[in-house]
Amino acid sequence: MAGFVHNAALVRNEMHKTLGILAWAMVALLGAIAVATVALHRGEPINALWLVTAATCCYALAYRFYSKFIAAKILALDSLRATPAERLENGRDFLVTNKWVVFGHHFAAIAGPGPLVGPVLAAQFGYLPGTLWVLAGGVFAGCVQDFVILLFSVRRDGKSLTEMAKDEIGPIGGSVAYLAVIAILTILLGVVALIVVNALKSSPWATFTIAMTMPVALLMGVYLRRIRPGKVLEVSALGFILVLAAIWGGQYVSQSPALAQLFTFSAPTLAILIMVYGFAASALPVWLLLAPRDYLSTFVKLGTIGLLAVGIVALHPTLHMPALTRFVDGTGPVFAGKIFPFAFITIACGAISGFHALISSGTTPKLIARETETRMVGYGAMMCESAVAIMAIIAACVMEPGVYFAINSPAGIVGQAPATAAATISAWGFPVTAPQMQALAHAVGEQTLYNRTGGAPAFAVGMAHIFSHSLGGETLMALWYHFAIMFEALFILTILDAGTRVARFMVQDALGHVYKPLGRTSWYPSILVTSALIVAMWGYFLWQGVKDPLGGINSLWPLFGISNQLLATVALCVATTIIIKLHRAKYAAVTLVPLAWLVAVTFTASWQKIFDSSPRVGFLAQARVLETVPATAATARLIFNNRLDAAVTGVLVVMVTLVLFESVREWLGILLGTKEVRLKESPFVRTRLAMEEQG
Amino acid sequence: MNRLKDSIGGSAAKIFETAIAALREIFDEAPYARFLNRTGLESSSEAYAAFRREFEEAKVRRPKCC
């Protein structure tokens, strides 16, 4: 009898195994068909569901097999090893937390406007390059980086990337990582502020809506402090309703000549207002304005991403953008440069972002209960971020290509007058007419949609298209458009204030070594000086973008992409070094291949941005062209800006080259046996959690 | 059939509970509850102010991604 039961169990196991293999084979087959359709389909528009299917199958396979392989063979995740959340639990920073809660926390921290804006800009090459990069870059590079850095930080008591770089590579690694973070924050804040300026300029409806988020946030702050202390979800829902009311009210503001004039600003005025906001946000107490805005932004962000996913699946729109456009040759109006390397630095957050390594070695490792959970949190959350980028590609590509280029092309390229711009874009083979653009602008409640560079307005039009077709119809198009603009601007302003504060703390920490009081985060003179310094740094890039005749995005977004991917290079150097130190050199390709790819991409992009002979691509070539035109104060400033951008790019590359050199020296020393392996892991302590669960 | 219903109902309740727990953590309600627990304070305007003072120093240092 016992033998019969045993045999039945064996047969059942075999059946489960066979069914599992069959199911995964089906997923692989479906994924292959979907990817092949996306990659090979030409001539006719393609349905967005093909992208959704390809992405879903790729993510499922990558998570099931690739991340499991990394977890088992390279990282050897140990569920019996106590994590810092358990060993150092203090109820504040270190805290054993449910894995789904950590997942939500981590995703909310890594998801920003990057995966929405980058893919929209890269759509000028067509839907194919961006889609393939988001899928391949996501599962083979970005998810791997986030996962391994998270695990290595967990094994080092939650140490930051800069500390790990210093410990594992050497002091140069630590210093470069620190400087790279400051550089990225500065460029990032400048470029995202420019996106907001471009979305709000000459738009009373959008400006009114964003202006209203300030009193709403103040009200939320008072409610939280005085009326219902700590009831954040409740007040966020209330704030959300008030913001929706502001979006609704915005249409009446835009229709009233007196009110519309009050909320209509030029780009330079908006830039100044945003700099003043950034300074105030950094120097003032956070509880009244910033914390409530942060909550409101997170509330809107999580809800909107979910809503967009549902909208895309429900509507499954047709993509009108071709797979590849003529601009793969590098002559694109949105930004100049060929697919390689520029598609790969334009899309960062959706595929791989060095910034994520800061989050993976920040708060998250201090909350992880078990090592085995790093796979779901690190690899899984980045997969979700990658899926957001796929949604952004769909939103950009549902538009007629002519409309997409009319919105995203700067006046310096297509011309200022609507008829001229439409004629130029139509001559490229993407038909669009001035009346068509006028009708679209009218439908979304704007005066014009021409020259709205930066990606945010194009994404908003795409999102409004998807939403209005699944919820509310054409009559709600204007409301959905302004909802999308509000969502992006709120997102970005939250990053601006949080980023300015983080950068201020970093500068204060460094200055504290020179003069102690400057390091005190509560000393007001230090707060004012360092806040002004940080705002001046990113404000300079913002001003440069606003005054740039090519729209600013052409020079600033690649600069941001390069710096972000260079930070990913540093993170992958740290990861590869640790893998080699763990005696897993035969598997080092898992981080080494993405590292080699990023080095090729960022170094080529940097070289081209500095030295390319085309003035639209190379900073120095642009400066040389400007030297030939009659000298004015404006051209002198543009020449200086181009040389400054070239110098910043050069300095970043030199710094990362130093880290690479140090890393390779470390690897060779270990592999050749000339260097002793010194791994700075915390010692193994057996977890109590497993015993508690068993007991 | 009833067992299946119970099981689905139980799973749905668990998913809902986890989602709420995640939201409470993301929106700092859970840290506030832990603060009250740790300090033995009752929820009030003063307690919330004390929580924010302690919490903000750490929280505002967290980077948010692009």
Image (cartoon, rainbow, N blue to C red):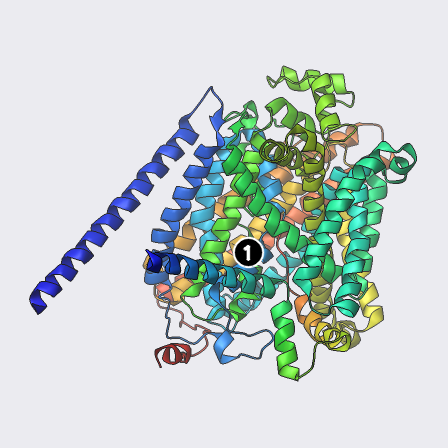
Is B10 located above or below residue A478 in the figure?
A: below
Q: Depth check: A239 or A94 in front?
A: A239
Q: Position of residue A140 (x, y in %)?
A: 42, 48
Residue A342 visible, this orientation: no
Q: Position of residue A176 (x, y in %)?
A: 60, 60
Q: Which residue lies at the image location 85% right of the left edge and 69% below the top edge?
A: A525
Q: Position of residue A72 (x, y in %)?
A: 33, 62
Is A468 located above or below residue A73 in the figure?
A: above
| Label 1 packing within 10 angstroms: few (<14), some (14-19), many (20+) | many
Which residue is the site of mark 1?
A: A107
- Chain of the residue displaying label 1: A
Q: Quadrant of residue A182?
A: bottom right
Q: Position of residue A534 (x, y in %)?
A: 76, 58
Q: Quadrant of residue A669?
A: bottom left
Horizontal relation, residue A19 to residue A563: left or right = left
- Helix, strand or loop at label 1? It is helix
Is A49 located above or below residue A218 in the figure?
A: above
Q: Which residue lies at the image location 52% right of the left edge and 28% below the top edge?
A: A319
